[in-house]
Image (cartoon, helix red, strand yellow):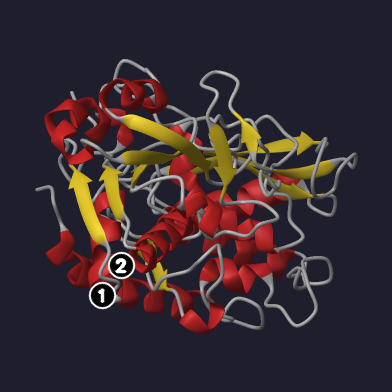
Amino acid sequence: MVALGVDQIRQYQSWFQGARVGLLTSITGRDSNLRSTIEVLREVCHLTALIGPEHGVRGDVGAGEDVSTYIDAATGLTVYSLYGSAGKHFTQEMLDQFDILVYDIQDIGVRFFTFISTLYNALTDCAKAGKTLVVLDRPNPLGGELVEGGILDMAYSSFVGCYPLAARYALTSGEAAAMMNEEQGLGCDLKIVPCKGWKRDQLFSQWGTVWQAPSPALMTFETTLLYPGLCLIEGTNLSEGRGTAAPFRIIGADYIDAEKLMKAFNEERLPGVISTPVWFTPTASKHQGKKCGGIVLHVTDQSKIRPVTVGITLLDIVRKLYPEDYAVLPPYREGGRPMLALLSGSDALTGDWDRNEILSRYERESREFAERKKKFHIYE
């Protein structure tokens, strides 16, 4: 059984004596008995403020939705947002509420999942303000060994990629924080409460606990396992399944023949995954209200699947089957970068490209990152 950082907070209670404590957390901030970290911290320290990332402290906010400052009904504490109109950094008003910031969020170990950007901003802001940052560590649900995808080209940095990590970076939040703090020379007073019982080769399914969805679109671990590659679909005119019962497992568009795509994908014989055809009508997002053809992806072997390869392969198949219909979405704002470039970390997928060349580069950069990250490993 894996023990989380929050499970051991009482052993580190002396760190918080006499200090005002702010908590940066989400709906996943719970101990192994599913008690909210908010409740746990109120018993061991002077909790003075709550701060929320994307989706909010209680997980009741949709993807990309702004959150304003409000009073938490359960505790009476003020809730500040790092994903709202005030921006994604700590304001002076927020910093004035605490001496120590505690971070407890279940991240998924994927560069473009925005919690890692929130953690980086917390590091930089706490360092500048002379605040202590305490990370209550949690295992990486995608494991701590397998690295996938290319390293972010910082010319394409954004909130969906703020640091030169591989797409699937195989570090815990505590390890990633230590890496960013040291490599950037931030000088943050960083403390880490480690988890126990986790080994680097363990995926979430080996933890012996229930899945706490880190966002409304990642309701199952199977979906999360596919996400490092399937999120790339968001940068194209393909539906990534938002507005269906299985986002990031259902992929398609109104121009796709379901049987044709299933056959082409399954002929690739990618390890650990297979597809079945589906017809669907999204209730939200791309192709809303339109009948779409596509596939449902099924993970057949969690240890063998390589989701980044799956995502690149799908994009390659669709653009070749439907060259007149497939398109990369334009930037959200004038002068910006296409979302596909921001997600993938370069412009390589936005023009003409060769699948084998892309995957070969990703493999090389993954090996480089796997070596670079070793010095920051806390767990064996």
* Element carrying mark 1: helix
Residue 292 found in image quarter: top right
Q: Residue at x 48, y 36 (%)?
A: 26
In the rendered view, does 213 fall on the left or right side of 164? right
Q: Is residue 299 left or right of residue 368?
A: right
Q: Can residue 309 be seen in this view?
A: yes
Q: Dot 2 corresponds to which residue?
A: 180
Residue in the foreground of this view, choosing between 201 and 53:
53
Q: How far apart are marks 1 and 2 (CA)?
A: 5 Å
Amino acid residing under circle 2: Met
As shown in the figure, which amino acid type bears the numbered disc 1?
Answer: Glu
Q: Name the spot of residue 310 as percent of width and height, x first.
A: 49, 56
Which residue is pictured at 66% across the width and 45% down the height? Answer: 63
Can residue 269 be spotted in the picture? no
Q: Does the residue at mark 1 contact the one at mark 2 (Cβ under 8 Å)?
A: yes
Q: Where is residue 244 in the image (x, y as percent from the top left)?
A: 72, 34
Q: Left or right of 170: which side holds 289?
A: right
Q: Quadrant of residue 279?
A: top right
Q: Which mark is residue 91?
A: none
Q: Nearer the viewer, residue 265 or 308?
A: 308
Q: From the viewer's perspective, is residue 156 above or below residue 250? A: below
> Which of the labelled discs sits on residue 183, or is there none?
1
Crowding at mark 1 (Cα within 10 Å: few <14, some 14-19, many 20+): few
**How many labels sit on residues?**
2
Res 371 quadrant in image:
bottom left
Position of residue 238 relative to residue 210, above or below, is below
Q: Pick the quarter of the image with the N terminus.
A: top left
